[in-house]
Structures are given as C-alpha cells and as structure tokens.
Image: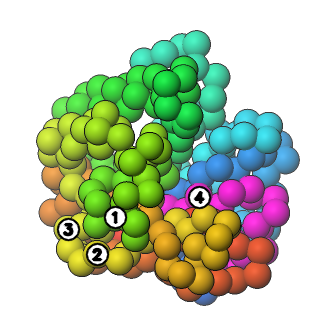
C-alpha cells in the first residue's frame, strides 16, 4: 500500500496538478491538507473519475483536509478529539481495509503557530498535546496507524537548509520540536527518517526569494507510523520534482510504502 501526504495549498487552484500526479503515481491512499474549500465546493468529481473515494473535512478559505483512497474509507471521523469548541478543519481519520488487514489513516494539518508570543502559538502547542493524547489512546487498538500530514514542525537542524534562519519561527521552537519528540516517544516512527538519514531532503520551499531554485527548503510533511505500521514499512519517497510544475503548491508529496 502506497500512502502519500500532500499539502496542496488550495484544492481548486491545484486540481489539475493533483489529478496529473494521481494518474502518474497511482498511490493507494492520499492525505491532503490546506484544501481552502468547503466540503460542497471541493472538485471531487475529477478525483473520483480516477478511481478514488473522497472524504473531506473542509472550511471556507482556510485549512481543510481530505482522504482519497482506491479502497472504501470506513469509520470516517472528522475533527481532532479533545476540544469541542475547536472549529478549525484540521483532522480527518478513517480505516482502509486490505486483503492483509485494516490500516487506520489520518490526514492532519497542524497549526503554523506564528507569530510567537501570540494565541496562535499557544493554539499550536495545545493542538499538538491533543494529537499526542489521541495518538496514545489510538495505540491501545494495536493496529497499523499512520498519522500523515503537514506538521509545521522542523524536527531537527538537518531538516532545514538554513536552520539558523528559523530560530524565531514557530516551526523550529524547542516547545514544538519537544512535542514532536513526545509523539515519537509514544512509539511512533518518522517514516522518512527510518529510511533515509541524510540531510538535504525537504518537502517545502517558500515562494519567496528563489527558495526552490536555491533548494532552500525544510522538511515539515511527515508520516508518523505506529509500531504495527512501522513493522510494515518498505520505503519512502519525496516527489521533489512536483515543486517545479506550473502553478505548484509550496509543498510536495511524500509517499510511504507499507506491506499492507
């Protein structure tokens, strides 16, 4: 099973790129983030024509997440547990059954948190704590679980071309990175780092200052695997070339293959 995560930075404006990539790469499951669209305005027909089931948790102009799957999406839940007052569309989760068993997969869009010293950073940290609590509870099911998405966290200095430029950014704060490590300490594996320990691998390049042309990127799109999913991991790829397409997102797809 090939599971991908991709922050598309606007599903309606990127639908041609999304469909072209789906046709070329043929992933089994895709976790999309930053749809910037209400559920009813997502151009799902174009995706469904390619053989995918589509489930969304949308929001007008901001946020929004989706799951695409060649197999049926079962037991779909929308929203991250732990705060009933949180109206931001940042989390969707479902089960995909295969011939070898079921895999629980979530698409998440973790808050950016900037600027520091504001309620936005507090919200980021609170959201991460809720994610950790939910992940801990989910581990009790002892089934393969993949938490995939735009984490808006640079885990280590080697995950940025110029880490010194991110010292005052919410993505690289000790609190953000510490909570990411706390998730790892529960037993979750960063799929990419399990397969490739080398520096210089990124999933995001800003639109400004020629970041793409200079490879001035950061790695913030992660697939975190429960122990049962990590045991099935076979490889990970970053589709870097997609950033060079016409009208690209500032993120590119990351794909993990698991034996499920």
Mark 2 surroundings: few (<14), some (14-19) or many (≥20) residues within 10 A: some
Mark 4 and mark 1: Cα distance apart in space: 17 Å
Mark 3 and mark 1: Cα distance apart in space: 14 Å
Would residue 23 be visible to someone looking at this image? no
**Magenta part of the chain:** 1-21
Q: In which image quadrant can residue 70 be found?
A: bottom right
Q: Is residue 45 left or right of residue 27?
A: right
Element on which disc 1 rests: helix
Task: Determine which residue is flagged by label 1.
Answer: 159
Would residue 67 be visible to someone looking at this image? yes
- The reply to whether discs 2 and 3 touch (Cβ–Cβ < 8 Å) is no
Task: Determine which residue is flagged by label 3.
Answer: 194
Residue at far right of view: 41
Task: Determine which residue is flagged by label 2.
Answer: 199
Give whichever of discs 4 and 1 has the lower sequence position.
Answer: 4
Report the mark closest to the observer, 2 or 3: 2
Give whichever of discs 2 and 3 has the lower sequence position.
Answer: 3
Return the residue nearer the eye: 165 or 142. Answer: 165
Task: Determine which residue is flagged by label 4.
Answer: 7
Mark 4 surroundings: few (<14), some (14-19) or many (≥20) residues within 10 A: many
């Amino acid at each position: 099973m090939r599971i991908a995560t991709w922050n598309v930075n606007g599903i309606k404006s990127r639908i041609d790129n999304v469909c072209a990539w789906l046709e070329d790469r043929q992933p089994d499951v895709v976790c999309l983030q930053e749809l910037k669209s209400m559920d009813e305005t997502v151009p799902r027909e174009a995706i469904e024509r390619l053989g995918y089931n589509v489930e969304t948790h949308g929001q007008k102009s901001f946020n929004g997440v989706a799951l695409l799957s060649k197999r049926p999406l079962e037991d779909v839940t929308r929203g991250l547990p732990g705060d009933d007052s949180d109206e931001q569309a940042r989390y969707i989760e479902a089960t995909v059954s295969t011939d070898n068993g079921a895999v629980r997969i979530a698409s998440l869009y973790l808050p950016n948190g900037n600027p520091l010293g504001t309620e936005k950073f507090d919200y980021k940290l609170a959201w991460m704590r809720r994610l950790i609590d939910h992940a801990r509870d989910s581990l009790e099911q002892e089934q393969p679980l993949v938490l995939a998405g735009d984490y808006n966290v640079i885990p280590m200095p080697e995950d940025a071309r110029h880490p010194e430029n991110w010292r005052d950014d919410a993505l690289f704060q000790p609190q953000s990175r510490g909570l990411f490590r706390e998730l790892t300490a529960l037993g979750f594996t960063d799929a990419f780092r399990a397969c490739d320990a080398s520096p210089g691998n990124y999933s995001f390049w800003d639109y400004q200052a020629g970041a793409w042309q200079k490879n001035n990127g950061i790695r913030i799109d992660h697939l975190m695997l429960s122990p049962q999913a990590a045991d099935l991991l076979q490889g990970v790829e970053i589709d870097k070339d997609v950033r060079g397409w016409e009208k690209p997102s500032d993120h590119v797809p990351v794909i993990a293959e698991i034996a499920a």
